[in-house]
Image (cartoon, grey):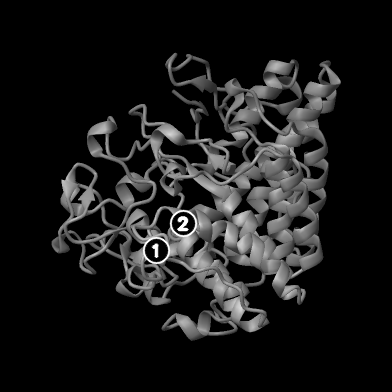
């Protein structure tokens, strides 16, 4: 049985709303605790007790979810726009078709929804940060609540910077008449993320108690800082923060790769930052379970694996069958057939047997935004880019060795990478990320930060498609926003 941050809330329509309704920390064994929503209240009146602060903090976790209410299509930016998948389904979401073909515009709905969702999370974090010091409570508890809010705000800003580049930066709750501001340069956004992660790490525990599984930890803060430095190619700072993650002694690779994507082995030793979902039949579960499931099993089939991705694994790599379903494979209570997808392949990760959930969109499988395997691959990449190619072999081999051990023929599969050539090592690390992290929502952004998207993705225009357009709705509301080039 797992604990999770449950996500019951009253949706807020814009960045200008006050408190969102709370998320309640629940235990799956005990069911739902009935609580009245906060609704929209004056923050100064609401923040009176520690319980109020926790309730407000819980609401800041809500925008993380890939659930029906959020309509969070971040996954499509990372997967469909990349070379991992094409848009399947029945064409009922034209925005996904546009993402696949690089024909999206500022009016594509998925960008508007995503922008608002992240700023709702940021606003909720700022409400907590602005008011936490007004409450009489134990200093350690105050610090932990502050640390979680800082981390969540950093995570939302990281996603915004990934998707849009420069974005408005708000570190306090801002009156409506002061919201119309220019975009903040991405470098300043990253700098804020890094400051907030450093402060959060000093306030957060290395491990959360079982009743708080899913809340931010010190390791998650160090890891997010490392990732932000990775996107700036600040390799020394990447290594500094990776070392802090490793020095905690909390994380390790699971012996079985599949345990990162199965219901009974979630929140494991490999999980650094895991976004909790629960299938309790209220539309709160992981909607990827329906978005990605083949239409033959009543899913939407919105991400059909490209043959190039399916066939791009090294010979004998077991991660192929753990990531991709192909003809005659067992497939969530059925036998997969070529007719299940127009490409003959479908994703496996984050999906589960439909008989195990109350309804298709209520999957229980969490999304692990940062795994320790990825941390090791950051380390390998940073070491190699610093010219320490020999040192990069060890973290890369640690990841490959786990996969090799699960191969049908471990003696010959996935040989160790021992090259001393920096470019050869660079290509090996990039191939490893593709195989290890397939369909974990990293691929498009990797291709962009490596500067090779134009060479890999048909239709990608250099100087334009590195970022997505600022939503037209936001442009209309705020005359100080300048659109990204080419849109």
The x and y percentages for residue 183 are 72, 64
Place residue 93 in its image quadrant. Answer: bottom left
Q: Residue 43: x and y, percent?
A: 72, 27
Residue 137 shows in the view: yes
Residue that appears at 67% across and 43% down: 220
The secondary structure type at the circle numbered 1 is loop
Question: For this rendering, which residue is in front, 400 or 364?
Answer: 400
Return the residue at label 2: 403
Q: Are marks 2 and 1 in contact (CB under 8 Å)?
A: yes
Specify the quadrant that holds the N terminus: top left
The answer to whether residue 435 is left or right of residue 272 is left
Look at mark 1 in the image and give the residue it sits on: 317
CA gap, disc 2 and disc 1: 7 Å
Q: Nearer the viewer, residue 458 or 350?
A: 350
Q: Quadrant where the C terminus lies?
A: bottom right
Q: Which residue is farthest front?
A: 411
Kindly state the secondary structure of the residue where label 2 is placed. Answer: helix
Q: Is residue 311 above or below residue 111?
A: below
Residue 383 horizontal/vertical position (percent)? 73, 68
Q: Where on the picture, by quarter, is residue 135?
A: top right
Query: Residue sitting at 27 percent across and 59 percent down?
Result: 92
**Residue 449 horizontal side relative to residue 48, left or right:** left
Which of pointers 2 and 1 lies earlier in the amino acid sequence?
1
Camera-nearest residue between 103 and 200? 200
């Amino acid at each position: 049985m797992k604990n999770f941050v449950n996500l019951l809330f009253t949706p807020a329509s814009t960045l200008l709303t006050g408190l969102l309704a709370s998320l309640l920390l629940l235990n799956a064994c005990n069911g739902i605790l009935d609580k009245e929503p906060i609704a929209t209240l004056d923050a100064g009146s609401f923040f009176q007790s520690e319980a109020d602060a926790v309730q407000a903090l819980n609401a800041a976790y809500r925008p993380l979810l890939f659930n029906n209410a959020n309509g969070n299509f971040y996954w499509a930016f990372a997967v469909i726009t990349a070379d991992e998948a094409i848009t399947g389904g029945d064409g009922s979401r034209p925005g996904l078709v546009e993402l696949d073909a690089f024909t999206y515009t500022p009016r594509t709905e998925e960008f508007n929804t995503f922008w608002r969702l992240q700023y709702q999370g940021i606003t909720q974090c700022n409400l907590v940060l602005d008011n936490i010091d007004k409450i009489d409570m134990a200093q350690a508890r105050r610090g932990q609540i502050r640390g979680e809010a800082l981390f969540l705000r950093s995570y939302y800003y990281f996603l915004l910077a990934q998707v849009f580049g420069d974005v408005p930066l708000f570190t306090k709750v801002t009156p409506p008449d002061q919201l119309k501001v220019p975009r903040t340069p991405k470098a300043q956004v990253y700098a804020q993320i890094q400051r907030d992660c450093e402060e959060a790490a000093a306030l957060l525990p290395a491990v959360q108690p079982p009743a708080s599984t899913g809340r931010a930890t010190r390791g998650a803060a160090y890891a997010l800082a490392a990732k932000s430095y990775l996107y700036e190619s600040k390799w020394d700072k990447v290594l500094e923060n990776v070392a802090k993650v490793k020095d905690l002694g909390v994380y390790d690779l699971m012996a079985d790769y599949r345990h990162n994507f199965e219901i009974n082995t979630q929140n494991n030793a490999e999980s650094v930052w895991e976004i909790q979902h629960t299938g309790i039949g209220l539309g709160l579960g992981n909607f990827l379970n329906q978005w990605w499931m083949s239409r033959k099993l009543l899913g939407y089939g919105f991400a059909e694996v490209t043959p190039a991705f399916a066939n791009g694994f090294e010979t004998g790599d077991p991660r192929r069958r753990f990531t991709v379903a192909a003809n005659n494979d067992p497939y969530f209570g059925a036998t997969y057939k070529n007719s299940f997808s127009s490409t003959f392949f479908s994703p496996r990760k984050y999906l589960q047997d439909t008989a195990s959930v109350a309804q298709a969109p209520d999957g229980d499988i969490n999304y692990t935004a940062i795994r320790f395997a990825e941390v090791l691959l950051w380390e390998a990449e940073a070491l190699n880019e610093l010219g320490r190619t020999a040192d990069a072999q060890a973290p890369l081999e640690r990841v490959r060795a786990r996969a090799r051990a699960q191969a049908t023929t471990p003696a010959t599969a996935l040989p160790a990478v021992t090259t001393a050539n920096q470019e050869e090592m660079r290509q090996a690390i990039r191939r490893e990320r593709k195989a290890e992290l397939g369909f974990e929502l990293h691929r498009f952004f990797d291709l962009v930060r490596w500067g090779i998207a134009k060479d890999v993705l048909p239709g990608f225009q250099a100087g334009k498609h590195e970022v997505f357009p600022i939503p037209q709705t936001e442009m209309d509301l705020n005359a100080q926003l300048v659109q990204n080039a080419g849109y």
